[in-house]
Amino acid sequence: MNTTAPAASSRSASTGHPHGDEAVSRVRAFLDARGPALERRVLAEGWKAAEPGLDALRRDVQAAGLWAPALPRAWGGMGLPLPAFARISEELGRWLFGHYVFGVQAPDMGNMELLLSHGTDAQREQWLRPLAAGQVRSCFAMTEPEHAGSNPVVLSTTAKREGDDYILSGHKWFTSSADGAAFAIAMAVTNPDAGRPHERASMLLVPMDAPGVELVRNLPVMGDAGGGWASHAEVRFHDVRVPAANRLGAEGAGFALAQERLGPGRIHHCMRWIGICERAFDLMCARAAHRELSPGEPLGWQQAVQFWVAESRAEIDAARLLVLHTAERIEAEGQQAARDSISAIKFHVAGVLGRVLDRAIQVHGALGMTYETPLAFWYSHERAARIYDGPDEVHKVALGSRILQRYGMPRRERP
């Protein structure tokens, strides 16, 4: 089974951020040494069977001082700024489980960022501290089967105030990693009469073992229901009593917090996708250079293959520069100033990811359809890159509209 990740000598060193170079090298060396055997088990037996080994590797990451590179040191992390973490995210993305074993996996990383920015001291102690230490997992419950996930201001889940509690009722799905999570951050309508739809929902911290919380099932995605962290669940809240002290941020601020959560999250995702691209590129090039169509005739002599290699190299390098530029802007100027770039990287890098994986599979032929390499796993699991965190089309419409409004086009008011 050829799942190793050879050193990517073609990777441009000039795109690096001046901070965190040593951390990037240490992360790469750690995963190159420990990753292959565990990745083979994940591909052969599934995530659930591999979880004990993955959790043991998490403890080794902590012992090596590489845990949670994006978290502040006060919370057990490495305290790296966003641009430096972006480069580490690329290294982690080269492996199926990189982000998980380093404690910066979705949805936990986004939930930790929310708790850091908007949690009360009591909330941070109760929810953030064990999450940051890797002792528990969390999930994020926003999408509902009854409504388009691309329009998060339309929700049927409600949280009605009753004294010092909210009574939470509703139906969610694609609640990623709910299977085994200790708590959820749930979006629910608390202010149905608010004048603006963006001010109707709030976020609540909900223990997953609270009475009335039902994990209905893990949804099969591309035929794989997964399990544990690698799952996407359907969840129902049946009149769950949630203390008002568990509200995250101000009442009615749920949509604003969700948008804030997604900005750095798109940096994390996009750099993870670039890591996948680099691994796929290495596998593609190695296959093209050594697989013979006939004795003495490597596959790489084919002009079509040379085109795929050249196009992939250019697209990956350009995508990396765009994402790192966006990370620098977020760090220096804030998310609002970088919103155009945030939209651009989401759809652009997702497209690059799909094309690079497709080319790599084509070069591998029938082998590319198997789990002898990680390519088929990524091809099915990462097709969602063009859908989650806002479909490509939504980002293109939003970005195009903002640009045209600067040229004087009137704003289109929507109900």
Image (cartoon, rainbow, N blue to C red):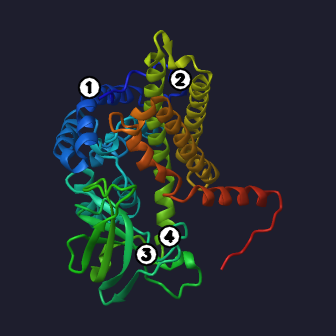
Q: Amino acid at mark 4?
A: Phe
In-image side of 97 versus 305 (left or right): left
Badges 2 and 4: C-beta atoms under 8 Å apart? no
The quadrant of the picture occupied by the N terminus is top left
Q: Amino acid at mark 2?
A: Ser
Residue drawn where x is 50% and y is 44% of the image: 270
Badges 3 and 1: C-beta atoms under 8 Å apart? no
Q: CA distance from mark 1 to mark 2?
A: 22 Å
x and y percentages locating residue 168 in the rendered image: 33, 82
Task: Tell us which disc is closer to us: 2 or 4.
Answer: 2
Residue on which disc 2 sits: 12
**Element type where label 4 sits in the image:** helix
Q: CA distance from mark 2 to mark 3?
A: 44 Å
User: Does residue 221 sit above or below 102 in this rendering?
Assistant: below
Q: CA distance from mark 4 to mark 1?
A: 42 Å
Q: Earlier in the sequence, mark 3 or mark 1?
A: 1
Q: CA distance from mark 3 to mark 4?
A: 7 Å
Task: Tell us which disc is closer to us: 4 or 1.
Answer: 1
Q: CA distance from mark 2 to mark 4?
A: 38 Å
Task: Tell us which disc is closer to us: 2 or 3.
Answer: 2
Residue on which disc 1 sits: 33
Residue drawn where x is 37% and y is 71% of the image: 186
x and y percentages locating residue 45 in the rendered image: 22, 44
Q: How many other residues sit within 10 Å of disc 1, few (<14), some (14-19) or many (≥20)?
A: few
Q: How many other residues sit within 10 Å of disc 3, few (<14), some (14-19) or many (≥20)?
A: many
User: Does residue 242 sit above or below 123 in this rendering?
Assistant: below
Q: Earlier in the sequence, mark 2 or mark 3?
A: 2
Residue on which disc 3 sits: 202
